[in-house]
Image: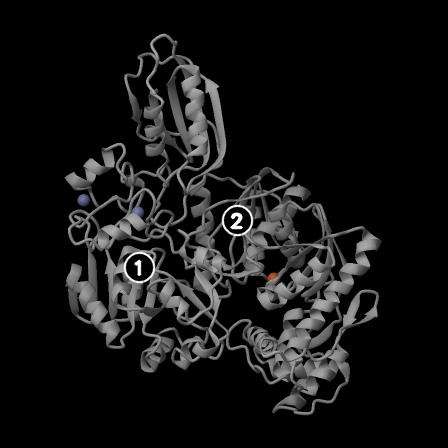
Amino acid sequence: MATKQSETNSYYRITIRGIVQGVGFRPFVYREAKTFGLSGYVKNNSGEVDIFAVGPDTAVLAFVESVKRNKPRLSFIKSCEVRPAQPPKTEFEDFIILESGTATEPAIRFFSPDLGLCEDCRREIFDPTDRRARHYFNTCTNCGPRFTVLKAFPYDREKTSMDVFPMCEKCAVEYTTPGDRRFHAETVCCNECGPVLSYKRGDDLYSGDEAFAEAVQDLKAGQVVAIKGIGGYHLACSPYDADAVRNLRVLKAREEKPFAIMFRDLAAIAEVCEMSREDEDLLTSPARPIVLLKMKQEKRNAFTQAVLNGADGRCGCFLPYTPLQALLFDSIPCLIMTSANRSSSPILKTEAEIFALTDRVLYNNREIVRSVDDSVLQTFCGKPQFTRRARGYTPSPIFFSGSVKAEKPILALGGDLKSAFGFLQDQTFTLSQYIGDLENTQVFQVYEAAIPDFENLFAIQPRAIVCDAHPRYFSARLAKKLAAERNIPLIPVYHHHAHIASVQAEHGLSRVLGFSFDGSGYGEDGTVWGGEFLLCEGGNCKRVGHLATAELLGADEAAKDARKTAACYLRALRIPNPEPSKGEELVYAALDNHINTFTTSSMGRLFDAVSAILGVCQTNSYEGECAILLQYAAEAEARAGIAPLEMRFIPESGLTFGYRDIFEKCLTRQPGAALGFHTAVCEMVSSVCLQLREAENINDIALSGGVFQNVFLLEMLQKRLTTLSFAVYTNEAVPPNDGGLALGQAYIAAQKL
Ligand code: ZN
Ligand code: ZN
Ligand code: FE
């Protein structure tokens, strides 16, 4: 469509905000402008795209509509402002892409997360005639690293860790040719000009294709190899090789957690796991997360035992997301790919760190600016649930629906476990990547340093800080320090209120009945809460009921030893323990004298105790192990058609529920007990909902807290409550575990300020 001579030209400034940088937005705008015969320019300002459009009114407006409708697949338009402008001093002869400028007014900045290898780039690396054949760092406007290579805004090559790789002539031509797939792709490079692959084996050093071949040979020979990825290093080895997996566990400091496995393609996953449509969509999405999938019954022993360590009800699966991985998995169908770190330390991202850990390293000379772990999700009832939100999602914003918004920027510090902080500006919440457990000093250092990193990157100056109410949380102490240094208000928020508020924020619910089922969390009376029924309205919260409390042993070890936890519950109920374990007398002595004990209404601890009593799992060798195995046991019983053993929670007073019947029935260890326990939890929740529906006139139910990572329980509850015509809401954008606390905290703080 050419500009008609008869129509006079008008001038417009168009400002587009959202995820518009690093996703091929400027080249797209350029092509659209050409299509509509406009002249003018497009440029990146800090976090926004600025367009000056010259042409007849009808053409400019059609252009704007087309931009909104046909925007690049990975972009997101939060707002699009069109206003008339003054004619420039000299007329534009053409439409051009300008160098980046600086935004004139403060705006909320958005940026693209890292994107998995796209189909076009994948085809090129496997095409021997292509000039990017076997190019280990192939990217285009639709794929490649983004957040992990960004040093500062605006997103230009000089502001990324690609700055040290000047483009060769051919790449420069592609970069400057409108219509090319690599037009203004900031990470573009090729075999001539990009980063170089290296392999270090002890004192031997290999480069390029030779490096690749040597690493593949070592992997096939059963070695553990460290491989540099997008947000950090992986440790890789065959899941079929018992010796290799044992060596890997030694490297990881004997961490017991199941390992995730990367597979060549969906077909390779389908051989061992069950997958729904939603699972497939997640696995192949540009984020390429780890997805927890049910192992096929007959394939539960497919891998050597130490891979899943008995937790063989699920396997964390993911697909190659870098060109290097795609090439690697062309000759190897699957490998354990676990983040390279020592148990509960931060993921390693530099050569210095990884060389100190292991002597077989496949690496390159592109710097990882910030470490970002692989994301972990699972699906239930067709919906996604995050266990860990990081690569591929961070820093994509989460938008509040509903009317709650921040008058001024708020920093929310989250909790100490699975820590992640976030910033709320207006209704836009930017959550940091999963960082880890703050009791580890190195993790705390990463966490503390990441806050100013986000503040600088996104140009945010928080005017209030919100944190967990727990006085001894590391995150809460840091909040106190930061608030004092900056002389801004500090708002403490109760743990379980924040869990439920995270669901309210996601779904725009001003009033809900929330169930926060969790391992722990500081409560309003100073005891440890975790089996809470909360009526949440606006920024307020009322505890309307809870699990009965018990006194448990407080030492760190007690949370690990589920047998001791079980002994404490039995003691509290005055039920004799038929199978007392060693040291039981000491447990009783400690309880009787209240030495190092605490009072709790925790649902997580109750799962531990039941798991131990049923002989499912006695020890949490990693967080949640007893509860996870109890879930798998219940699933196995359901699959085998075993009827749930009849047991129930009985109200002691009001909506405080006791569990004497649960323990008495579980001690019989009859078939269907694991399933019966899940059913009893489900029935308790349903009965609370039914009682409060009339009394409180409430129909919206929110479920959150770490216990709801048990998707078997969640699915059961969702179905039960839906049958009773309740509207059930869960976390879909953040984890229900403590990784989602920051969102809830910000939602509450915005209303308290
Ligand atoms: Zn691509
Ligand atoms: Zn090149
Ligand atoms: Fe929690």
Q: Quadrant of ligand 3?
A: bottom right
Secondary structure at badge 2 equals: strand
Q: Locate residue 432, reporting x and y percent.
A: 48, 51
> In terms of image quadrants, where is residue 316?
bottom left
Answer whether residue 316 is visible to the viewer in this image.
Answer: yes
Could you say which is closer to the camera, residue 721 or residue 664? 721
What residue is pinned by disc 1? 350
Give the quadrant of the C terminus: top right
Kindly identify the amino acid type of the residue bearing the numbered disc 1. Thr
Q: Quadrant of residue 591?
A: bottom right
| Disc on res. 576 | none
| Residue 177 to residue 33: above or below | below
* Residue receiving disc 2: 422
For disc 2, the neighbor class at 10 Å (few under 14, some 14 to 19, many from 20) is many
The percent coordinates of residue 425 (x first, y second) are 55, 39
Distance between the alpha carbons at the discs numbered 2 and 1: 25 Å
* Whether residue 593 can be seen here: no
Q: Amino acid at mark 2?
A: Gly
Give the side of residue 135 with respect to residue 507, left or right.
Answer: left
Badge 1 marks a residue whose secondary structure is: loop
Q: Residue at x 42, y 42 (%)?
A: 111
- Would you say 198 lies left or right of 435 here? left
Q: Is residue 298 left or right of residue 720?
A: left
Image position of 496 with respect to 48: above or below: below
Residue 689's spot in the image, x, y percent?
76, 59
